Amino acid sequence: MRQAMEDTQLDGMLTVRQVADFLHVSICSVRRWSDRGTLRFYRVGSRGDRRYQREDVLRFLEDSSRYFLPNNPTSKG
């Protein structure tokens, strides 16, 4: 039963490749943001693969977009 629950939880999570494709960036960028603590991730499996929750990726995207909005005095544009 426990294994089935873990598999169900993983079904809703994204791989590094999926996050990179969604954000239109490289896998290295996703890993770098994860290592810095900017993008939350979880380690899964015996290899410790990274997995991301969709809500965390969307929150990261929303938080990051504040730096690039034209009305933001800290943006460089």
Image (tube, grey):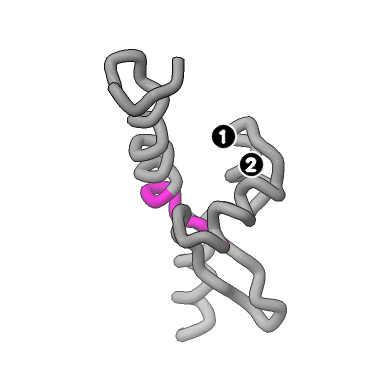
User: Any mark on residue 46, and which?
Assistant: none
- Quarter-wise, where is residue 67 in the image? top left
Please, is residue 13 above or below residue 21 in the view?
below
**Contact (Cβ within 8 Å) of mark 2 with mark 1:** yes
**Residue 15 in sight:** no
Quarter-of-image position of residue 19? top right
Tag 2: residue type?
Answer: Ala
30 to 50, vertically: above or below:
above
* Residue lying at 45% horizontally and 75% vertically, measured from the top left: 5
Residue 52 inside the magenta-drawn segment: yes
Looking at numbered disc 1 in the image, what kind of residue is underneath it? Leu
**Which numbered tag is attached to residue 20?**
2
Magenta span: 51-56
Q: Is residue 62 visible?
A: yes
Query: Which of the two residues, 54 or 35, is positioned nearer the viewer here?
Result: 35
Q: Is residue 45 left or right of residue 37?
A: right
Q: Position of residue 11 (x, y in %)?
A: 53, 59
Tell me if 7 is positioned left or right of 76 in this view: right
Tell me if 70 is positioned left or right of 50 in this view: left
Q: Is residue 71 above or below residue 65?
A: above
